[in-house]
Amino acid sequence: MISPTPTRVGLLTDLYELTMAAGYWQCGMDQNVATFELSVRSLPLQRSFLLAAGLEQAVEYFRQLSFQPEEIDFLRKHPALQSVKPGFFDFLAQFRFTGTVWAVPEGTVVFAEEPLLRVTAPIIEAQVAETYLLAMLTYQTTVATKAARMAQVAGGRGIVEFGTRRAHGPYAGLLAARSSYIGGCRGTSNVLAGFQFGIPTYGTLAHSWTMAFEEEEEAFRQFAEIYGPRAVLLVDTYDSVEAVRKALRRKLPFRAVRLDSGDFLEISRQVRKILDAAGRADVQIMASGDLNEYVIEELIRQDAPLDLFGVGTDLVTSRDAPALSGIYKMVEIESGGQARYTAKFSESKISYPGKKQIFRFSGPGGEYARDVLGLASEEFPGAETLLEPVMKSGELIRPLPSLDQIQARAAANLSRLPAPYRRLEGGDSYPVEKSQALKDLLEVLRSRYIPTPAAAGGPGKE
Amino acid sequence: MISPTPTRVGLLTDLYELTMAAGYWQCGMDQNVATFELSVRSLPLQRSFLLAAGLEQAVEYFRQLSFQPEEIDFLRKHPALQSVKPGFFDFLAQFRFTGTVWAVPEGTVVFAEEPLLRVTAPIIEAQVAETYLLAMLTYQTTVATKAARMAQVAGGRGIVEFGTRRAHGPYAGLLAARSSYIGGCRGTSNVLAGFQFGIPTYGTLAHSWTMAFEEEEEAFRQFAEIYGPRAVLLVDTYDSVEAVRKALRRKLPFRAVRLDSGDFLEISRQVRKILDAAGRADVQIMASGDLNEYVIEELIRQDAPLDLFGVGTDLVTSRDAPALSGIYKMVEIESGGQARYTAKFSESKISYPGKKQIFRFSGPGGEYARDVLGLASEEFPGAETLLEPVMKSGELIRPLPSLDQIQARAAANLSRLPAPYRRLEGGDSYPVEKSQALKDLLEVLRSRYIPTPAAAGGPGKE
């Protein structure tokens, strides 16, 4: 099977989520309500902000979360689960997500340690979702962020996502198309992304078209005959400048040419000159091939006459920062009607307890000034709260925004983020402070779980 | 929809594949047989070999390649295809893959410019597959190669793939589990990979289990009660060394402990000492968290008492080299019963013409000595030929090997690759030379398509 069908999402998790699930069930803790929060521990060196993306697929996951009979049979026979009581597998057959989800809307600018998503549900429901949620949200957030960096330096020039072939499998390409669009790309080459998400799709011809004809000129003529003024001619199969001359000589209809190799600055200047001299100032020039935000910025700085950029590898793999340190940590657990806060104190991997909220303060012009990461129960007058309710009792509370609305939100968010936080390199660190209540809560828990130096090693502590 | 169903693979392509397809159809060229080859243009700086993977999913793709009625409706309305004659869409409704596929078996060591796969089919069938094949084969090859680097430095110690949460979406995680296993991992944490591919799955508990109980000791006791001697205790939620002491004090059954943060060398030594002193020399120690082949090599060099490594992010994203320069180039096309060779001469992006074969010469001890990249019609006595027939008339010629057979092939191939080509850094460049016949053929084509300096710019050439 090439891709799991949606009914397979139950098993698309780490085995320990299921061994723990069986454990909670067997301890009679399966109805204990727990809260988990998903955040990014720290930003990669090359990033000073993130653009949240992937929530729509997270919601779809929760709605489809279940275990099919043949999957349950597989688990029954799993060596790791041989000591689990059979009732657990019957429990899985009825298993559905019934919890509450809060999240920052897609297209929101966020920073390290800020929760993108918060799940409150019977502990097994919240636990098994960890793996899928992390992969889905951090990847889409990674690509949306990379796209935003490119769109920003491109100014009004369009960026089109061309990267499915270089993505981590074809389905990563589909997700990349979606999240690139959120980040500000004009469209994608991925046709399924057009079909499934309504994203504008772009593309005309590859080198193979030219190679399929004995002469490049004949290849262009045939293509222009079919596609007329829609045609974008790829001109670098043999010699870019010469190819443009051929197309002009035949007075072919075409609306753009695409350069896919060579010195883009030099060639685009030559091509622009030839086009203008032939009275084709209307023809646009597109560049593709090993582009990223740094190359695009430099080309624009040098005033290269390029109108469009097709970006693949660097965008869909976020090559300079291909992963985020996403975490999904339990912050509260209820038992016997009482809530208990939870935190982790591993060296350099502290997680803060309690249901949290992001409080964002803006300056007089609406520009983002600072965030306070506080407990959800706190109030900070004048601040926007970023986490919103999304699902309740396992159902969507209200329809999710359209992809165009998400893209517009991203653009609006980015326009409110002051320039020092948007630099490609060496961006300032946006101020995110923890509220006093949150810091106090952590210290209360720390004093409880970490023995003081005096007590360390002593048997009396426990 | 979270993931495309298998029937959606037709649209999982770049739009230009379909505009070209329509063009070929409209030019009456749709039955012209073309041959495309998929290869990696150059190895990333950090790699001196590749381990081929992903063929099984490529074969599944070809078998499922089709267009559903609602997909065809979508294409009919696509702005880019408005000038295409309606007959093309009827053609798509009947479209199936009927071609021939040759490939190097999964688990084969390959190098830059060597074809991993060769497709010969009516041009549209071969063309539309480009995007999917590149994404599937290059990603799995990337991860299998990364896994092989890790398995090699780990020696007999096991590596388990733990990375789905850090993969580029959950389906990339599934592919990573498969290709990591090919590269030499002992298993994966991804349960669906176990269900779907039969890969051994590993995992026991996360920090959240410990945090769900008021006391760490109680968390361990409960877990050990259910899982007994199968339990692997995660000990770093609060303090790793102290946690091991607690487990020993209660004389809990467990077979291993997992460290997930801190100084692995120092902590593993302390933990080993405590375990041995308590008569638990049988308990294994596993490390996980930000591991890669360099860190593992260094830990082993320092004689860290670690038995198992759980690797996530660096493996599934191949963080130091997250993409390969995969290309899929037309090398021959037939028309009117006559074959014509094709090549591309863009600056620094030359593609060699003709159906090719990899001829591998070995030394007296069976060790790989050098490859010749030649035309498929050539013969080199004494050399193994690496490309084998896989599909004919759109059908699999014989069953594909099992994943365990592929893993064994990979191990055998790697054992024949001399050490200088397997170094983690600064590996020697394995000799791959082009045959004289191949070089001659390229020059014949070059003289035809690239004007000589004297002729450049002159109108006489065409």
Image: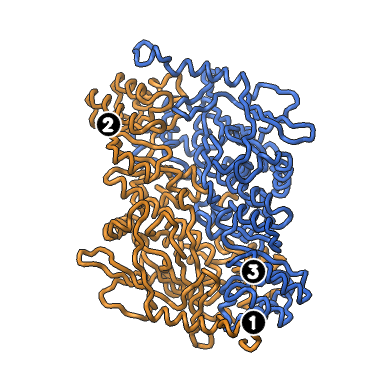
Chain colours: A orange, B blue
Give the answer, above or below, for where A249 lies relative to B41. above
Question: Which disc, if any, is residue A283?
Answer: 2
Decide: few, some or many residues near mark 2? Use Cα within 10 Å; few <14, some 14-19, many ≥20: some
Q: How many angstroms separate mark 1 from mark 2 (CA)?
A: 76 Å
Amino acid type of the residue tagged 2 in the rendering:
Val
Q: Nearer the viewer, residue A29 or A48?
A: A48
Question: Which disc, if any, is residue B316?
Answer: none
Q: Chain of mark 2?
A: A
The first of marks 1 and 2 along the sequence is: 2
Discs 1 and 2 carry the same chain letter: yes
Q: Which residue position holds label 3?
A: B267
Q: Chain of mark 1?
A: A
Q: Is residue A81 visible?
A: no
Total marks placed: 3
Question: Which disc, if any, is residue A457?
Answer: 1
Quadrant in the picture for the C terminus of chain A: bottom right
B324 sits to left or right of B234: left
Decide: few, some or many residues near mark 1? Use Cα within 10 Å; few <14, some 14-19, many ≥20: few
Q: Chain of mark 3?
A: B
Give the answer, above or below, for where A329 lies relative to B441. below
Q: Please identify the residue farthest to the left as the structure is shown.
A: A364
The residue depicted at 42 percent of the width and 62 percent of the height is A55
Residue A207, quarter of the rendered image: top left
Q: Secondary structure at mark 2?
A: loop
